[in-house]
Amino acid sequence: NEKNDNGLPQGFLVEQPPHSVTPPHFHEVNQFQVFVGGGGKIGKHDATPVSVHYANGHTPYGPIAAGDDGVQYFTLRAAWDPGAKYMPENRDKLKPGPRRFRLVPDVAVSSPDELAARTQGELKPIITAEDDGLQAYILRLGPDGAMALPDPATGGGQYHLVLNGDLAREDGDALNRLSCVFLSKAEPALRAKAGPEGLEMLVMQLPADAS
């Protein structure tokens, strides 16, 4: 798919069957991946729920190998990408520039009781903010708690992925587990509000250069 750029962000959930392998490859744009189900490996690293992976565009990574139960992961980008460029046959398409790979394995997820008992909000860094705005956090709020999140203007767009509880919305609806929200760098920062069971959510900001 080399043509259909609609100017919008691109996010999807991959469901990779048991023992399948996605060969080493790269993409043209920056991306986060969040492993949310099953288990497997990315390269030599374990990729079990919940693990957060970031790669710059034109940074080869992989293979992604699914375990006995398969593996499920989100791929999240601020811009359209034409598809995987498998290695080594596409080495000539690699552009020069900084390669960057970040992997945060085994992000601790609260039990429903732990989340319901929380009285103070927490925004804990899991990828410390870098000079170009790349950063990631886990947000934890008790029932009906609220907190202002970092301004997306400092980077190249933010993804928010609900891991537990609910993200309340002004229209009365709520976004529950594995719901995903994108904010462009031109949009105001989100003031996150938890539902009656609390909220645990990843906040992932892409670097200022979205390509």
Image: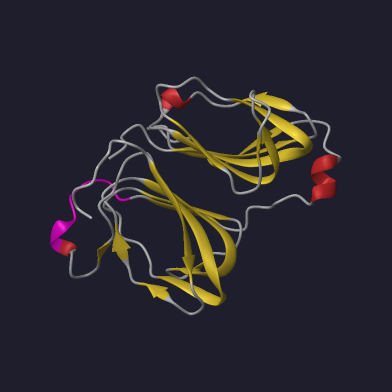
- The residue shown at (82%, 37%) is 118
Image coords of residue 40 (percent x, y): 52, 71
Decide whether residue 50 is among the magenta residues: no
- Quick check: is 97 in the magenta stretch? yes
Magenta residues, dominant SS class: loop
Numbered range of the magenta stretch: 92-99
Residue 115 lies left or right of residue 210; in this view the side is right
Q: Nearer the viewer, residue 98 or 28?
A: 28
What residue is rendered at 53% in x and 68% in y?
71
Taking 140 as reference, is 102 above or below it?
below
118 in relation to 81, above or below: above
Residue 133 falls in image quadrant: top left
Q: Nearer the viewer, residue 99 or 160?
A: 160
Across and down, in percent, residue 184 comes to 41, 29
Query: Where's residue 36, x and y in %?
Result: 58, 58
Give the quarter of the figure containing the C terminus.
Answer: top left
Residue situated furthest left in the rendering: 92
Q: In which quadrant of the rendered image does the N terminus lie?
A: bottom left
Q: How is the image coloured?
A: secondary structure
